[in-house]
Image (cartoon, grey):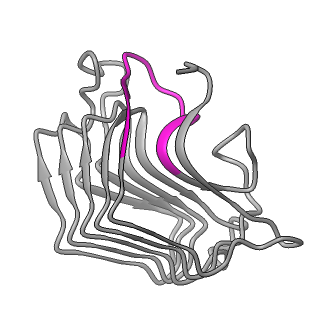
Amino acid sequence: YNSTYAWGILVKGSVAAPADYNSIENVSVVLPLMSSGSSNVTCIVASASTTTASTTGNVATGLKIWNCNTYGGSYGIYLFGNNTSGQGSPNAEVKNCKIRNCYNLGINGYAMSSLLIQGNQLLNVGTGATQNTTYSSLNQIQLQYCDTFTVKGNSFTGALGGSAVLYQYCD
């Protein structure tokens, strides 16, 4: 375990070498419980970089993350799209996953279009190894610059403050 970079699964794509139409199904990813936050300690990541989760340019059209379990880390699932116009990485789905004990966010989507987040269980987001008191508004699901998204049928248990779903700059 490297406290700087610990990704369970990385889907890396770019415009020149897209990572389109991949599926991650029926897997469990376990990372250590964290006592501080970094997007580089995440169970499942889609990014354009092998060293920074929050790098735009990922092209992961049609990425399917279904029936997965994540435990620990700072983030459960971190999806970073192509740009801030909301037109990147269309038709990704996160369905029927159980996301437990991550320190910051359960599911983060950035610059994804037509994103579907459905039927997931988010448990104890914001706890990790210690209770996260650094952020006064922890969000279970956070979407930024995501256009035409659908969030439905998710359940939230044991969260600390914040919103169940927060979306910003989405059209």
Give yes or no for residue 85 being in the magenta stretch.
Answer: no
Image position of 17 with respect to 35: above or below? below
Residue 99 rendering spot, x and y as whole percentages: 27, 49
Please state if 171 lies on the left or on the right of 81 as rendered: left
Residue 36 rendering spot, x and y as whole percentages: 43, 18
Q: Residue furthest front?
A: 27
Residue 14 rendering spot, x and y as whole percentages: 80, 66
Image position of 166 with respect to 71: above or below? below
Please state if 59 lies on the left or on the right of 35 as rendered: right
Q: Residue furthest left?
A: 157
Disc tally is 0
Residue drawn 10% across the image and 39% down it:
158
Image position of 131 with respect to 25: above or below? above
Residue drawn 52% across the image and 84% down it:
91
Residue drawn 16% across the image and 74% down it:
153
Image position of 48 with respect to 161: above or below? below
Residue 159 rendering spot, x and y as whole percentages: 17, 39
Give yes or no for residue 40 being in the magenta stretch.
Answer: yes
What's the magenta region?
Answer: 29-44
Question: Which residue is at the front of the view, 118 or 159?
Answer: 118
Residue 75 found in image quarter: top left
